[in-house]
Image (spheres, rainbow, N blue to C red):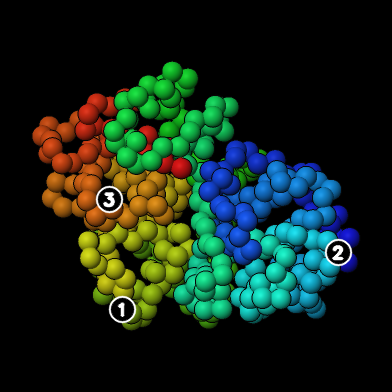
């Protein structure tokens, strides 16, 4: 049976061409024995695994093997048994896609870690999975990473053939004029920025099919599989979760009226808050809190996770200010703490830096606020083009 899996592995590698090299590839410590790569559906986790195999082992090297837990073979064989056979045949690196489809997957990974010390395992899973909180067997042995959708930088490199590098938030704040000039010397980022906001976050925009229909299908799968299956929620509550997402997506970015939502959905306030958390875990929403507050308290603001979702859910009704705020908080999400701002700012980042998202040049400026502006190619001093924050990864 191993030969069958090797043939599948080779075929997939032959037909995998990563459109752009993801920054995460160089951030992972690949020497670790157990690596988990989480990400929302559609961001390219499978391609990422295959690209790693292709770069580091080539097509015919049987020391590395990709397997997908969708294969019915694993209904009759445990992951640990398969890993034993692979290692005995000379295997060194096992790449496991969609590990959560396997019953007792965390226990199986622990067995492999304990009993097959020469085997390295890299697995992908849904962003809904809480690898350490809900799977104590993996505490202290798994290195966890998040694969995100394309940044604007990655999208721009893909569309233009350039190789622009990523910058830290401090570099952007201190050197944004120079960064913008270096990019503008080669391409006009504003020519591509609107397209990115509409369809650039998810790699499947490259497929020859209707992007919006694909994204809607992916969003439904996030709820039907990632949330219901992993959180073990009864199917009869599916329509309530979908309705909640729609109400939140069309209800503005302020603090949600949880009592009204509970009434509309005919459920409790606690259930509404749990569903909001699940939608956030699935990377459909981002919750924004004031400093010092966190779940299960009600958030101060709610945004869709990225701008592509806005166009899919509310076509023709995307407000420019909300679009820019959504882009900004998504660009910083995962590496920086984005909290609700005060009177003079939209957001406070990492507990200290205040940002105001602006559609035009501010008439009055506070010396301790940075202004992220839409529709400008270059900025000056405190005024920074918002597109530059798409270069954070």
- Secondary element type, mark 1: helix
- What residue sits 46% from the left and 75% below the top? 133
For label 2, the residue is 89
User: Total number of numbered labels?
Assistant: 3
- Secondary element type, mark 2: loop
- What residue sits 23% from the left and 44% below the top? 355
Which comes before the other along the chain, label 2 or label 1?
A: 2
- What residue sits 44% from the left and 59% below the top? 284
69 left or right, relative to 280: right
Position in image of residue 201 (x %, y %): 50, 45
Position in image of residue 192 (x %, y %): 46, 30
| The residue positioned farthest toward the top in the image shown | 185
Which comes before the other along the chain, label 2 or label 3?
A: 2
Number of the label disc, if any, that sits on residue 349: 3
Q: Is residue 235 visible to us here?
A: no
Determine crowd level at label 3: few under 14, some 14-19, many 20+ residues with C-alpha closer than 10 A.
Answer: some
Estimate the spatial distance between the alpha carbons at disc 2 and disc 3, rounded to whole Å. Answer: 50 Å
- Residue 159 in the image: above or below residue 225: above
Which comes before the other along the chain, label 3 or label 1?
A: 1
Quarter occupied by residue 108: bottom right
Estimate the spatial distance between the alpha carbons at disc 2 and disc 1, rounded to whole Å. Answer: 54 Å
141 left or right, relative to 342: right
- Secondary element type, mark 3: strand
- Residue 342 in the image: above or below residue 390: below
> Which mark's residue is nearer the viewer, 2 or 1?
2
> Which mark's residue is nearer the viewer, 3 or 1?
3
Number of the label disc, if any, that sits on residue 269: 1
Estimate the spatial distance between the alpha carbons at disc 3 and disc 1, rounded to whole Å. Answer: 29 Å
Position in image of residue 187 (x %, y %): 47, 22
Q: Nearer the viewer, residue 152 or 83?
A: 83
Q: Quadrant of the N terminus?
A: bottom right
């Amino acid at each position: 049976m191993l030969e069958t899996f090797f043939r599948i592995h080779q075929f997939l590698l032959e037909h995998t061409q990563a459109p752009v090299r993801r920054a995460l590839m160089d951030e992972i410590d690949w020497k670790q024995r157990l690596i988990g790569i989480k990400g929302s559906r559609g961001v390219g986790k499978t391609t990422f695994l295959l690209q790693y195999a292709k770069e580091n082992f080539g097509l015919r090297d049987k020391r590395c093997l990709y397997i997908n837990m969708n294969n019915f073979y694993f209904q009759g064989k445990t992951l640990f048994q398969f890993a034993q056979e692979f290692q005995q045949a000379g295997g060194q690196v096992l790449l496991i896609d969609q590990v959560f489809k396997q019953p007792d997957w965390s226990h199986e990974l622990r067995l492999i870690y304990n009993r097959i010390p020469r085997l390295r395992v890299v697995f992908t899973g849904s962003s809904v999975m809480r690898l350490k909180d809900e799977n104590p067997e993996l505490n202290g042995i798994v290195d966890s990473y998040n694969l995100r959708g394309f940044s604007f930088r990655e999208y721009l490199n893909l569309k233009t053939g350039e190789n622009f590098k990523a910058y830290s938030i401090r570099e952007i704040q201190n050197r944004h004029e120079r960064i913008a000039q270096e990019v503008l010397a080669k391409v006009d980022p504003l020519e591509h920025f609107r397209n990115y906001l509409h369809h650039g976050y998810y790699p499947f925009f490259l497929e020859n099919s209707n992007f919006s229909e694909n994204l809607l299908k992916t969003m439904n799968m996030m709820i039907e599989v990632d949330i219901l299956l992993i959180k073990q929620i009864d199917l009869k509550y599916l329509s309530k979760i979908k309705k909640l997402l729609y109400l939140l997506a069309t209800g503005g970015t302020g603090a949600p009226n949880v009592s009204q939502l509970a009434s509309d959905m005919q459920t409790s306030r606690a259930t509404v808050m749990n569903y909001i958390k699940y939608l956030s875990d699935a990377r459909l929403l981002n919750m924004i809190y004031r400093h010092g507050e966190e779940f299960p308290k009600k958030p101060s603001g709610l945004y869709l996770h990225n701008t592509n979702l806005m166009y899919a859910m509310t076509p023709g009704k995307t407000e420019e200010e909300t679009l820019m705020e959504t882009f900004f908080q998504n660009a910083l999400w995962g590496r920086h703490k984005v909290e609700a701002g005060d009177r003079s700012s939209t957001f406070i980042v990492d507990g200290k830096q205040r940002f105001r998202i602006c559609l035009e040049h501010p008439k009055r400026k506070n010396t301790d606020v940075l202004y992220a502006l839409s529709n400008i190619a270059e900025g000056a001093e405190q005024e920074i083009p918002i597109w530059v924050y798409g270069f954070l990864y």
